[in-house]
Image (cartoon, coloured by chain):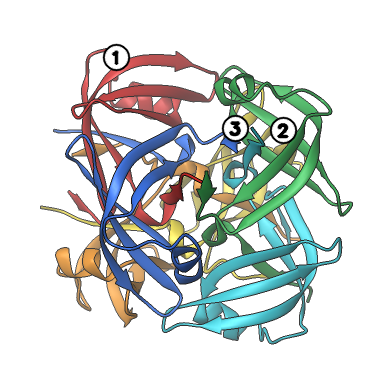
Chain colours: A orange, B yellow, C red, D blue, E green, F cyan
Amino acid sequence: MKISARNTLKGTVKKIKEGMVNNEIMIQLAGGDEITSIITKTSCESLNLTEGTQVVAVIKASNVMVAVED
Amino acid sequence: MKISARNTLKGTVKKIKEGMVNNEIMIQLAGGDEITSIITKTSCESLNLTEGTQVVAVIKASNVMVAVED
Amino acid sequence: MKISARNTLKGTVKKIKEGMVNNEIMIQLAGGDEITSIITKTSCESLNLTEGTQVVAVIKASNVMVAVED
Amino acid sequence: MKISARNTLKGTVKKIKEGMVNNEIMIQLAGGDEITSIITKTSCESLNLTEGTQVVAVIKASNVMVAVED
Amino acid sequence: MKISARNTLKGTVKKIKEGMVNNEIMIQLAGGDEITSIITKTSCESLNLTEGTQVVAVIKASNVMVAVED
Amino acid sequence: MKISARNTLKGTVKKIKEGMVNNEIMIQLAGGDEITSIITKTSCESLNLTEGTQVVAVIKASNVMVAVED
């Protein structure tokens, strides 16, 4: 499947924080940055995510803001 | 200003594609990845974005999806 | 690629309205409903979308609201 | 009230999974598809959602991605 | 129609900036603040928005970030 | 830091409802309106939010919908 979302960043699951409905997924990117994602617990289980799983963070361009330091 | 958005990725504006209402900002991240953002033309001008501007891509965690290769 | 987004609805591109940065994609779902999507022109071209292309509308669960009739 | 969100899909609440802050609402669409939504527990209660409630899934067009099979 | 989106702010359309696919709607809130919205041109026309139209800005709680001054 | 998000509304934290992963923040705006935000518990703690904290609600323009009364 090829998706319209413009941003795909490769990384590894570093930590999963579990809630009742949503889980928080911390992803260590190859480039050194870290990305945090909130997805449903059901999706997390469906993708078999655990610490160390190779993943891709996917972000629609309209959800990316830009900031500059003052 | 300190913001609740969990993801802040430092980079440099690589290219700006202008529309009438929205502009597309391509950002080269320090780690090597590239991020594309859609913001209003007004914001783009207000932040004085041009090629080479040092910026931070800001993304709310609930807007990050996770994918795994089949 | 398997993605965390919970909602995937199969359909066919019915019409594309082109902008300078974003395109509007109208999708006829198999079940009879119609879905409209805004994606970048670049993504639209990268996916080779034209009228009649078989596609999947993908929506993160946190972006779906619920309404009831009064 | 008439809203700018382009996508409104009629269905019936199939299941509600409760969290502490957010609830997950599974909606059976008339056309056969299923949609999952994450809304606040407060909204869920305010709308009196229970299994069987007739609802409308509402989605802003800019939150719909498009994918094609490889 | 009653919607799950938690935030509804009453105001008046102050200005509309037209694009080819998306329009930018500037809304003067009753409380004095100003809100800017990006919606499709089609929605803007469908709602008959013009300067002076009484409107409600509708925002899903998961799309609101919080910031504090340093 | 100056951010591209077009909407910044000043207010005071009125109430915090805690979940396991996400917290719900109710903000009393200066103009009288109330705004509800969902952010991660981690962000809430990182910003030291408590009842009475002066905050700014930040919203990207593409996440604001417009509605009109029938």
Quadrant in which residue B52 is drawn: top right
Residue in the image at 66% along x and 52% along y: E8
Q: Which residue is mark 3?
A: E39
Could you tell whether F46 is left or right of C2 in the image?
A: right
Q: Label 3 sits on what residue type?
A: Ile
The image shows residue A9 at horizontal and vertical percentages of 35, 55
Q: Are marks 3 and 2 in contact (CB under 8 Å)?
A: yes
Q: Which mark lies nearer to you, 1 or 3?
A: 3
Quadrant in which residue B20 is drawn: top right
| Sequence-earlier tag: 3 or 2 | 2
- Quarter holding the N terminus of chain F is bottom right
Q: Secondary structure at mark 3?
A: strand
Q: Which mark lies nearer to you, 2 or 1?
A: 2
Work out whether residue F43 or residue B17 is closer to the camera in this orientation and state it.
F43
Instruction: Give the Cα separation between the discs numbered 2 and 1.
Output: 30 Å
Rendered view: D43 above or below A59: below
Residue ranking furthest to the right:
E32
Q: Within 10 Å of the Cα at label 1, are there few (<14), some (14-19), or many (20+) other Cα atoms?
A: some
Q: Which residue is mark 2?
A: E25
Q: Which mark is residue C21?
A: none
